[in-house]
Amino acid sequence: FDGPVDSIWIESMNTVLDDNKKLCLNSGAIIHLTDRMTMMFEVEDLQEASPATVSRCGMVYMDPSNIGFYNMFKSWCFTIPKGFKEKKTFIPRLDKLYK
């Protein structure tokens, strides 16, 4: 989820965020999340979130200056297959292209 927290939908997420890990849909259907599943929210702010919701979430703050294409590119460089990394000009050329 991306954007500001809306008090209506975030409060509906409380059952997912607590130990029950059940997502209750408006249709009445219930989806059980397994222990290996996780919910992740990327929100603009927490102005509309209740203390109960905030206490159920782990928070990670990312400064806007650290987010951007070049930082994602540098992170991607760590996933490049070994064969490409052995070519000593490959990554420097890409790096120069995106700076």
Image: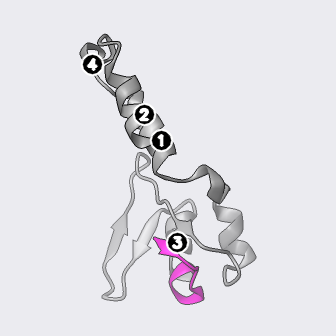
* Mark nearer the N terminus (1 vs 3): 3
Quadrant location of the N terminus? bottom left
**Mark 1 element type:** loop
Residue appearing at x 30%, y 15% in the figure:
82
| Numbered mark located on residue 96 in the image | 2
Task: Give coordinates of residue 27: x percent, y percent.
Answer: 30, 88
* Horizontal relation, residue 16 to residue 44: left or right: left
Question: Mark 1 = which residue?
Answer: 99
* Mark nearer the N terminus (2 vs 3): 3
Task: Give coordinates of residue 94: x percent, y percent.
Answer: 36, 32
Residue appearing at x 49%, y 67% in the figure:
16
Mark pair 4, 2: CA separation: 16 Å
* Mark nearer the N terminus (1 vs 4): 4
**Mark 4 element type:** helix
Q: Magenta part of the protein: which range?
A: 1-10
| Numbered mark located on residue 84 in the image | 4
* Mark nearer the N terminus (4 vs 2): 4
Mark pair 2, 3: CA separation: 48 Å
